[in-house]
Amino acid sequence: MTGQGTGGAAAGSVAALRITDAAAFGRVAVVMGGQSAEREVSLDSGRNVLAALRARGVDAHAVDGIPALLDALRAGHYARVFNILHGQRGGGEDGVLQGALESLRVPYTGSGVLGSALSMDKVRSKQVWLAQGLPTPRFVALRRQPGRSTAHAAAEVHAAARELGLPLIVKPACEGSSVGVSRVLREDDLDAAAALAARYGGDLLVEEMIVGDELTVAVLDRQALPSIRIVPKGEFYDYHAKYVAEDTQYLCPGLDGAAEGEIRALALAAFEAVGCSGWGRVDVMRDRDGRNFLLEVNTAPGMTSHSLVPKAARTMGIDFETLCWRVLETSFAREAELAAGGAP
Ligand SMILES: Nc1ncnc2c1ncn2[C@@H]1O[C@H](COP(=O)(O)OP(=O)(O)O)[C@@H](O)[C@H]1O
Ligand SMILES: [Mg+2]
């Protein structure tokens, strides 16, 4: 049995149907793993999601990676997809999988082609936010140009540093999990930071470092959940703090009163500005004067025991199983859009 959706058919504007009977979901593929660098994290997330959906009576099954998923979908095995792949460049999070699912007319969780692809590129996300008057740290984007000499690339990084001033953050434009991200406090550290970020594909992003608090805001079905303030033991929220350390502190809600309302509204606006829908998580830095700056949107956030969206949901009284159910419900908004789109 299904409830009533509201709103029109534009991307992201359709509220999820509220489902009361697990059978309404049909057979669900929980796609996880894949070949990306984030395979292990995705498998961890995926197993948790699978167990939660099954505990609620959903006919859910694990599928490892995109090729296996597409084969199974073409064979008619599944009615919808819960996407918990983490990864860029065809890894499940960047619009490639979403395009394939659209062409097969199979509904799925999370953002569509545009939101997924745009969110994967931090530079282009920032350009969209700036065009809409949404705050993001000042930056210089260094386009990757094949054949450009190392000396030329280094000169560009130093010119960017002079323009922005220290301290800086240097990061690859299209990675995740803090890989390739460096803090640059002294000009002497610039070359090493640029060399590290350049090891990854795509453009380089040199960004003003915001000194203050790190927050993240989950979005679920057009609603921002309570913010989480991340207080790492070490210098910043690096890969170790994200996935290994047990001493990072998470405060939820991260802010009080009007400031909490402000950051939630900003996160939701940022999420919608880049065409995202369904669910996701927006990373924000807040400086010592209480000004917020958008860093990025994560369109397939982790669902591990360390993960942040489940923490925010719990603060609202949404337990993990209910969260997975609610995320799966958002696939009905995608289904309505697919139906409105006519024949491919
Ligand atoms: N402009 C910035 N100012 C301060 N800290 C930053 C800035 N950009 C990134 N960071 C730090 O680096 C981490 C990773 O950066 P982020 O842009 O969220 O990329 P990703 O999580 O995709 O690797 C953030 O969680 C934050 O701790
Ligand atoms: Mg991040």
Image (cartoon, rainbow, N blue to C red):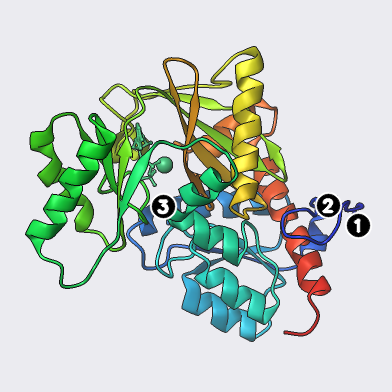
Residue 190 in sight in this render: yes
Residue ID at (60%, 44%):
132
Residue ID at (44%, 36%):
306
* x, y percent for residue 340: 83, 72
Task: Name the residue carrying label 2.
Answer: 19
Three-letter amino acid code at the position of disc 2:
Ile
* x, y percent for residue 40: 37, 55
Q: Which of 233 and 204 is in front in this view?
A: 204
Q: In which quarter of the image is the N terminus?
A: bottom right
- State the CA–CA distance, disc 2 to disc 3: 37 Å
Q: Is mark 2 on a helix, strand or loop?
A: loop
Q: Which of marks 2 and 3 is nearer the N terminus?
A: 2
In which of the image's four quarters is ligand 2 placed?
Answer: top left
Q: Earlier in the sequence, mark 1 or mark 3?
A: 1
Q: Which of 339 and 185 is in front in this view?
A: 185
- Could you tell whether 179 is left or right of 284 in the image? left
Residue 83 in sight in this render: no
Q: What element carries label 1?
A: loop
In this rendering, the answer to whether 239 lies above or below 42 is above
Task: Name the residue carrying label 3.
Answer: 123
